[in-house]
Image: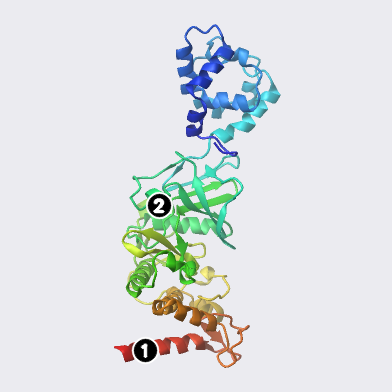
Amino acid sequence: MTAKFVTKHDLQEIWTYKRLESLCHIVDPRDVNIEATILALKRDLPRTLFILVTIHWKGWDRSRKIFFDTRYAPANERVDKNIKTYRLDQLARKDFLASERVAQCFLSSRDAFFPIGIREGMNKSYDSNRRLPLIQPPDIGRSILGDGASGSVTEETIAFGQYSRKKPPTDNETSREKNFLAKNAAGNFEKEKKILALLQTALSKHDRVVPFLAIISIGNDHNIFSDLARMNLDSFLNGEWSKFANQVNRMFLFTELTGIADALRTLHQGLYIPRNDHPNSDITGRVLLCHMDLKPENILIYKHCDHPFGLWKISDFDISKVKESREESTTDEQLDSSKRTGRHSSTYTAPEFDSSPKDVGRKSDVWSLGCIIVLVCALAQGADIYNELASKRGKLLDQGVYDDENGDRFYHKLADGSIILDPQAVNWTQALLQNTHSNA
């Protein structure tokens, strides 16, 4: 049991035979069929009994008449399965709780006993009084893994018995069966929900794209659940890779990069949305999806027995864009003016975000992937090489001080408006090519 909700499993542990036996002696010391009464209480009334205990109900001497006497109510009417239908006037009746104040306390406590059961693939909205079955460790609080304009990402534990998968978990999933990433979405939630739903129903799926496990809205609180990753690529690049191995292995790194590149290709040109799955959608058939925010923080890494450096997957589609594709088109289709991103340029965004928003499209994702490839290639040469490149990027080539105008972007915008590649990154990649050729 937690301070926020009580599950069926909690009630089974609370209402032991001994406790129910003691309750029966209090309710009716003359009960000659106590075994049958205990069975009925455990089967039909565990929630009701516990609510009455928590609100300090004083009418236990009347409980047999209230719940078992058919002169007061028809058989099986006042049982747990009907709790959700109780109204204030029903509960306050003299032959029930006999007090409007007590009835109101009962109703106020009721929702805590019906936490939402989370099922894999569900996408539902609930009233603001419903509760998620999330366990918050005492004195620790939630582990916040990310926090930004699109929402906060936390590590959550779903209470025992409150989550069900479509199929049994694999060996790789068993250890984290109850632990998940939960994104409390803001801003672009409806857009992200729509895109995730499209990805879920696409005929062509890719195992390097993070699927959602559940999307649940409670009032204005929006939550997207996915499997718990071990880390993201940003943490991996900045030293967390050592949790996988004692030294960097180039082949394994490039294998994961290849997987990410193939996933991006699928998003760009390999999605097909059946019309019968989305009959009311304005987007069906072959579609193009531009991620629009590809960066190391949005590449999650999962522990996997066949992937020594983890299984890398693309996540976070809150500003992604999707549109139908013309079958005959072979060129890069751009986003129309109504679908241009409002995201400011950052480390991994392409130059057109800053200079020519109308040209933002799939090639912009490819630029971002190229930036990531540079960093992974640096790590593949060794942690010291990566750290050296990281320390130089963002600094002026001739002065060694931080470039306040361009920051650590992989392109620089000059005073005349022209765009050039980041000189530090250019120098490093040219040196890498020379070393590669000389060692060939």
Element marked by disc 1: helix
Residue reaching furthest to the left: 440
Q: Residue furthest right?
A: 101
Give the left or right position of residue 111, taking residue 117 as reference. right
Above-or-below relation of 434 to 404: below
Q: For numbered disc 2, what is the local secondary structure? A: loop
Residue 40 position in % (x across, y down): 47, 18
Residue at (48%, 29%) from the top-left corner?
12
359 horizontally vs 89: left or right: left
Near mark 1 (Cα within 10 A), the count class, few <14, some 14-19 or many ≥20, is few
**What number is the disc on residue 221?**
none
Specify the amino acid type for callout 1: Asn
Check disc 2 and report the residue beneath it.
279
Local crowd at mark 2 within 10 Å, few (<14), some, or many (≥20)?
Answer: few
Tell me if residue 29 comes above or below residue 204 in the rendering. Answer: above
Between 196 and 55, the one lying in front of the other is: 55
Indicate the quadrant where residue 262 lies. Answer: bottom left
* Residue at the front extreme, as displayed: 246
Q: Examine the rendering and report whether any part of residue 432 can be seen.
A: yes
Which residue is at the far bottom? 398
| Mark linked to residue 435 | 1
**Residue at left offset 64%, top offset 32%:** 108
Rendered location of residue 335, percent (x, y): 47, 72
Which quarter shows the C terminus? bottom left
